[in-house]
Image (tube, grey):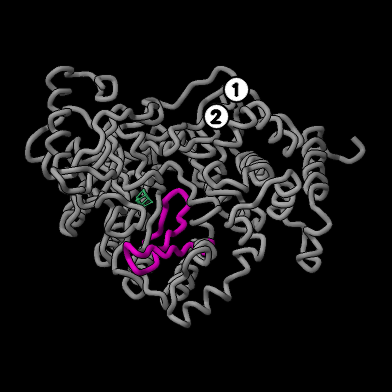
Amino acid sequence: MESGFSTEQQNYLKGFMAGVEARRGTLSPAGGAEGGGAPPDAMRAAQDAAIAAGGKLNAEEKMKREKHPLDRWDEVEARARAGRFPHGLENLATRWHGLFYVGPAQDSFMCRLRIPGGILSSWQARGIAEVAEDCGGGYVDATTRNNLQIREIPADKGVELLERLADLGIIPKGTGADNIRNITASPTAGIDPQELIDTRGITRKLHHHILNTRDLFGLPRKFNISIDGGGCVAVVEDTNDIAFTAVRMDGEVVFRLALGGITGHRDFARDTGRVVAPDEVVRVCDAILRVFLAHGDRTDRRKSRLKYLLDRWGLPRFVEEVEKQLGAPLRAAGPFEPAPPPDKHGHLGVHDQKQAGMQYVGVVLPVGRITGDQLRGLARIADLYGSGTLRLTVWQNLLISDIPRERMAGAVAEIEALGFGTTASHARGGLVACTGAAGCKFAAAHTKQHAAALADYLDARITLSKPVNIHLTGCHNSCAQHYIGDIGLIGAKAERGEEEVEGYDLHVGGGAGIEQGIGRLLFPKVPAEDVPPLVLNLLRTWQEDAPGESFQSFT
Ligand code: SF4
C-alpha cells in the first residue's frame, strides 16, 4: 500500500471521486455557464437531465432553477421591510428559510424551528419564549418531529424572528419546501436504561452536515430522516424517508436501514436488508440524498417523494445506485437482536435514567401548545431541578431530564403549578393533533379543538386498561399521521341534514414500529360532534369484548 491508505480507505476515496466525476459528467455546459461561472450545482444538473429526457419541469422546479431560493434572502428582507406577505411561489422561497405564510387560515407566518433530536437547552427555551412573544403569537406548538413551531408572525417580523433564532443557535433553514426537515431521534438519548446507542452525536453531526451542504437544499421534494437508538420512547422512524433503527448484530450496535416511509401515502419505510455503522450514518445519508436529488421526479410534484423513485426503480436498483455513490457496498444485515420494544406512552410520567439516582419526567402538553410564560417556567424547572435540558418527543410533549430522584416530587409540583400534568389517561396520553383549521389553510376540520374536546369526553366516561393512540389530522398532508393511530381521524366534509359540517373519516388499526400497520377506513364522513360518542363506543366494545388484547389486534 504505497499510498499509506487501507483498502477500505482507498475504496472510499475511489467512490468519492467517482461520485464527483458522475456529478460533473451530468452537468450540461449551460449548467455552469448560466450561473456565470457558478460551481457545479447538483439540482440544476438533475433538472437538465429531466429536460433532456423530454420532461417538463413543474412550476416549483422552474422557480428554483431561475434563482436558487437560498439566494433570495434579499427578497425576503425586502418584503419584510414593506410589511408584505409572500404569495404563490414567493411563499416557496420564504419556506427555504423556515417561514410559511399560512393565510387565509391565519394572515401571518408560521416558523418551524430546527431542533436536532428535540434536545433543547433551558437558555434556548427562554430565548424562544421571548422571540415568540415579541415576534409571534406569544406561544409555541410542539410538533410530531421533536420540534417547535411559532405562529401568528406578522409580515414585518419574520426576518427579525429568524435572526433572533439564529442568535440562539436555532437555524430553521430548510424546514419547509423541498428540503430535509428536522432530524427526529430518540428523545431519551444518553439517559435511557434500555437504549442500544446514544444517538445525540450522530444526530448533531447529520444536522450540521445538512445545514452546511448547499446541494442538499435542492431536492425534488421534502425529506424526513429519523434515528431510533432503541430507547423506551418510540420515534416512529419507519414513517420517514430514511429510517435508522438500532439493533445489535455480531455483538456490535448498528442501524438497520429502511427507505421511503410516507404514511400519508400509506407506505412505511422498506427494509433494505442493509445495516449502517454509527460512524457511517452521515456519509450514507448523504449518498442516499444525492441519488434522490439526481433521479427524483422534477416534473410531477405528486410523484416526487422518495417513495415514488423506489416504486419506479425497485429497492435493489436504488441500493445499487447508493453503493455506487458511496464507492463501496453497504453491509448486509445478518441475524440481529432488536432493542426491547418501546413503552407505548413512555413519553409521560416519571422514569429512571441509566445514571444511578436520576430520573426524567414527561410533561403532558395539551395538544402540544405552550405559552411563553409556561416555556420560561419549564426552562426554570429544568435549571433548578435538572441539568437545564428539555427534550421534545414526536408525541407533541416534552421531557425534563437529569432530576435526582429525591427532588422529583418538587419538580412535578412545579410542573403542575404551570398548568401541566405529568400523567394522562390512556386515552389522552397518545393524543396527537395537527394545527388544523385554526391555523392551516389545508385543514377540513378544527383538529386541535376537536382533539381536546374528545379527550375531555372520553376521560369523563371511560377508564382504559391499555394505552391507545388517537391521531387527528386536518388533510391528506397527514402532519399528525392519522394512518398510524390506533384510531386515526382525517378531516372531511360531512353532512348533518341538509347542512355541510366539519367532520372526519375515522380509521382504525394503524400503528408503527412493532405495531406497524396502516389504519383502515371504518366510518367515513362522521360529523365532528358525533366523533366522541362513536370513539367511546369503539373503545367500550374493545374493553368489553377483548380485554387483554391490543386495540390494534382487536380491530
Ligand atoms: Fe395543515 Fe393538513 Fe398538516 Fe393539518 S395535516 S397541519 S391541515 S397541512
Residue 131 relative to residue 446: left or right: right
Tag 2: residue type? Arg
Name the one closer to the observer, 499 or 37.
499
| Residue pointed to by mark 2 | 256
Disc 1 to disc 2, how far (Cα)? 7 Å
Q: Secondary structure at mark 2?
A: strand
- Residue 298: x and y in percent read 62, 48
Q: Residue at x 27, y 37 (%)?
A: 505
| Residue pointed to by mark 1 | 333
Give the magenta-colored segment's residue range.
96-122
The residue at the far left in this view is 461
Find out whether the residues at labels 1 and 2 contact each other: C-beta distance under 8 Å. yes
Q: Is mark 2 within 8 Å of ligand 1?
A: no
Task: Say the numbered circle drawn on residue 127.
Answer: none
Q: Is residue 455 shown to the viewer in this render?
A: no
Tag 1: residue type? Ala
Q: Residue at x 20, y 28 (%)?
A: 466
Circle 2 crowding by C-alpha within 10 Å: few under 14, some 14–19, many from 20:
many
Tell which circle, 1 or 2, labels the residue nearer the N-terminal end.
2
